[in-house]
Structures are given as structure tokens and as C-alpha cells.
Image (spheres, helix red, strand yellow):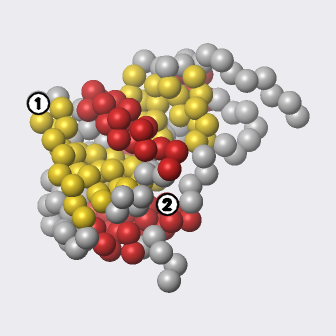
Amino acid sequence: MVTTPVTSITFEEYLIYDDGSDFRNELVDGRLELMNPPTIQHFLIADFLDTALKTEIKRCSYPWLCLREGGVRTGRNKSRLTDLCVVTLEQAKELLNVSAVFQSPPLLIIEVVSPESVKRDYRYKRSEYAALEVSEYWIVDPLETKITVLFLEEGLYEDTVFTSNQQIASRTFPELAIATEQVFSAGNLS
């Protein structure tokens, strides 16, 4: 089957878009941008963090969910796919039977950097998430073995970089006890 490339699409059309493939797309200024499949390392790191955050949510009895590949509307005709996002149960209930693209800011967004996403994760998503007022954003970078944690302060992100055995500091999860090296070790199969 041959499909005609979509040159312009609205946010509303994006929510119901289906080209018959299993490819994932982000919406950027009305254009669909194909997301490359993640690496095994990427999957393993995301899985480790997903498990750690879900465990902490349960331990603290927070009324939250940690979701993989949740969408976040970041502009009129913009929507990003997160590697992980933490949302309230109320946010999730609003989207229970529709496309999981949040239009209110998640409590926390985590992106795992891959070679083709460096500029997207560090620059574009950073500014879009700040404009949406996402209060905490992590950039987990296995290429540089560092985790950048960004906190929104007066509309701009202030960042702290964590490396080696440093404990990650989170405002959303103040009692979370994970060292940077644990995150990157999870991405290895040895």
C-alpha cells in the first residue's frame, strides 16, 4: 500500500491520525515527525526509571500514574511523545477513552537521549516544556552518562547535572534514592 505523505495536519487531526503503520509520530508545527525506534539501552533505562517511579508512587500513596510514551500538547499544532511522564489521576481520567495526549502539564517528564534526539531533547523539548510550565524535566543522557534535572523557576529552567554515583535530586519525588550510575547500569545487559 502506498500512502501519500501528510504535509499539514491540525492537532485535532493528529489525535485520530492513523496511517496503518505502527510508526510513532510527533506533531511539530503541523508536520508529522517520525520517531525512530528506541535502542535496547533506551528501553532498559526507561524501564528502570518507570519501575522506580511506580514503586515510589505506590510507597508514598501518591494519586499519580507514571506512563510511557504519553503525549503532551506543547503548542497550537505541536505534540511531543515523552519517554516517561508522571501525571495525576485526574489528568489521566480526562483521557481515559481518548488519545493520551495531555493538554495540561505533567508533574514530571523524562526523556532518554538517543543520537538523533540530542537537539530535540536538550533544546526544543526544553523550551516547549518550559512554556507549558512542566515543573520538572529530566534529560537522561547515556551518550554523555549524565542526567540533567531541570526545575522551572519564573518561567525558565534551572538545571543541575548529576554524574557517576551522585543521587538524583527530585522535587516531585523528594525521597527517591537513585544514583546516576544505577540508571546507566540498567541500560547494560552484562
SS at badge 1: loop
**Please, what is the three-letter code of the amino acid marked with disc 1?**
Glu
**Relative to the observer, which residue lies in front, 105 or 142?**
142
Residue 59 appears in the figure? no
**Relative to the observer, which residue lies in front, 56 or 119?**
119
The residue drawn where x is 12% and y is 36% is: 153
Mark 2 / mark 1, whichever is N-terminal: 2
Badge 1, how many Cα within 10 Å: few under 14, some, many 20+? Answer: few
The numbered dot on residue 42 is 2
* Position of 65 relative to 45 (above/below): above
The residue drawn where x is 40% and y is 61% is: 142
* Position of 91 relative to 41 (above/below): above
Farthest residue to the right: give it.
Answer: 1
Farthest residue to the bottom: give it.
Answer: 190
Q: Where is residue 92 drawn, in percent x and y?
A: 39, 44
Q: Where is residue 41 drawn, in percent x and y?
A: 51, 65
Q: Where is residue 61 drawn, in percent x and y?
A: 23, 64
SS at badge 2: helix
Q: Where is residue 118 drawn, in percent x and y?
A: 43, 44
Residue 14 appears in the figure? yes
Q: Considering the image in quadrants, where does the N terminus appear?
A: top right
Q: To which quarter of the image does residue 57 belong?
A: bottom left
**Please, what is the three-letter code of the amino acid marked with disc 2?**
His
Badge 2, how many Cα within 10 Å: few under 14, some, many 20+? Answer: many
Give the side of residue 165 with respect to residue 121, left or right. Answer: left
For mark 1, what is the residue? Answer: 154
